[in-house]
Amino acid sequence: MAKKKANPNPQPEVNAHSAFGPSKANRWLYCTASITEEKRWPDSTSKFATEGSCAHRLAELCLLDRVENKRKKPSWYLGRKCDETGLEYNQEMIDAVHAYLSVVFLEFSPEKDRIYVERRLDGSQIDPRLYGTVDCLIVKPRRLVVIDFKYGKGIAVHAEENEQMMTYALMAFLDEAKRSRFTQHIVQPRLDDPAMRHTTWNYDRERILTFSKQVSRAIFDADTDPTFSPGEKRCHFCRAAPTCEALAEYNMRIMAQDFEVIDDDTEFSPVEPDKLTPDQLTAVLRNKKLIVTWLNSVEAYAIDRLEKDSRSIPEYKVVHGRSLRKWRNDLTEKKLVKKIMKVVGSSIDKEQLYKVELLTVAQMEKLVKDKSLIEKLKSLWVKPEGKPTLVPVTDGRKGISSLDDYE
């Protein structure tokens, strides 16, 4: 690893994605068969992934600006287009990058540390197929710091025992073996839960060496004796999930609470909720996200197959769902209003075409930048209790129960 304060913008690799990439480590470390299974499916993207790529590019540019003292603030990029995705950098991205930079510069000391931005790391000492690009790596005299910026707001990711981050740390450790301590940060500024927007975890050399053995074993098993191991996190984004027999059987067992192998000729019938024991309820609830995600992926896969061949799945067909009428999008709003008024004439006023609503409290906070004015507005809003929601006991919020009044 070259010893310099910051690396230039890295050149794209010819083979940019590794079969054993860090971003999929929580999958291939446990479900070693997923490596082969996913190869049968093409890569796909979404508007959320494109938006995330745009935000990551902004984070990279802003971090390099700070490190290289270009005196260019993140707000300079507002409204400009991302050179990788073509999307415009918006205020929400600017705010998220500010949160990311604040964590980076809590760790980075220019006088004694080295920092690497969007650094390609190589794990070829373990296997040549092990490599990936880390958002930010800080090399301290005795400690390695890995920082990951996540723009998503749907799924919270914790830094503790996070396999993606540990894989980055392991690859950095292979080049910086003198370091005996490790810190990993995950910055996810758009989450609703403030406690999860920045999480961190510290560990030692013994833990990274143990993890190194786990990585080596998983890669060896994937090549020699791959096995399936379904689970919520590892299956969530797996491209092979819709046709994975192991995942289907796993979910059927959970829903039926029957740990015998389900025969193809047996009609599946879920157990009624009131007949489940507390332990069985826990097992079902723990796997709710996995089951729902799997069912959705199976449905999407079935729709795709039936659109290509209407006879490919017995008893089902694809139709157009219900939709709502909407104004034509080939007209500007000004032209549309003009045409509407020409038709309806004097039967309505032009102002009646628009619906005016009071801004929500959150929207008002974004509009009014003066915090002192926001403080004065606090007496005008209330925060009602949210509807009862199931969460694990590790959640920091106080539990509610009808029995609480008697304690």
Image: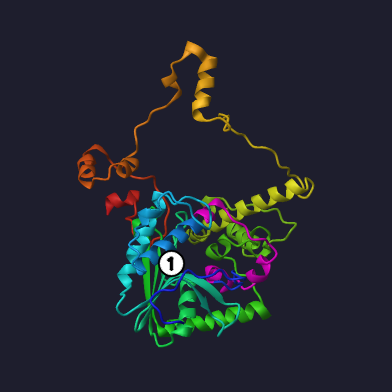
Report the span colored magenta: 22-51
Residue at the extreme right of the image, as rendered: 311
233 and 209: which one is in front?
Answer: 209
Q: Is residue 24 magenta?
A: yes
Q: Quadrant of residue 196?
A: bottom left
Q: Residue at x 36, y 53 (%)?
A: 75
Residue at the extreme top of the image, as rendered: 346
**Disc count in the image?**
1
Using the image, determine if residue 129 lies above or below residue 351: below
327 and 186: which one is in front?
Answer: 327
Residue at the extreme bottom of the image, as rendered: 178
Q: Position of residue 27 (x, y in %)?
A: 56, 69
230 and 125: which one is in front?
Answer: 125
Q: Amino acid at mark 1?
A: Asp
For the C terminus, the quadrant is: bottom left
Q: Is residue 164 magenta?
A: no
Q: Is residue 95 visible?
A: no
Figure coloring: rainbow
Q: Position of residue 184 (x, y in %)?
A: 40, 72
Q: Position of residue 80 (x, y in %)?
A: 44, 51
Residue at the spot of label 1: 148
Using the image, determine if residue 303 lies above or below residue 358: below
Q: Is residue 232 visible?
A: yes
Q: Is residue 267 left or right of residue 88?
A: right
Label 1: how many residues lie within 10 Å, few (<14), some (14-19) or many (20+)? Answer: many
Residue at the extreme front of the image, as rendered: 70
21 and 115: which one is in front?
Answer: 115
Q: Residue at x 46, y 80 (%)?
A: 172
Using the image, determine if residue 71 lies above or below residue 180: above
Label 1: element kind: strand
Q: Position of residue 122 (x, y in %)?
A: 53, 79
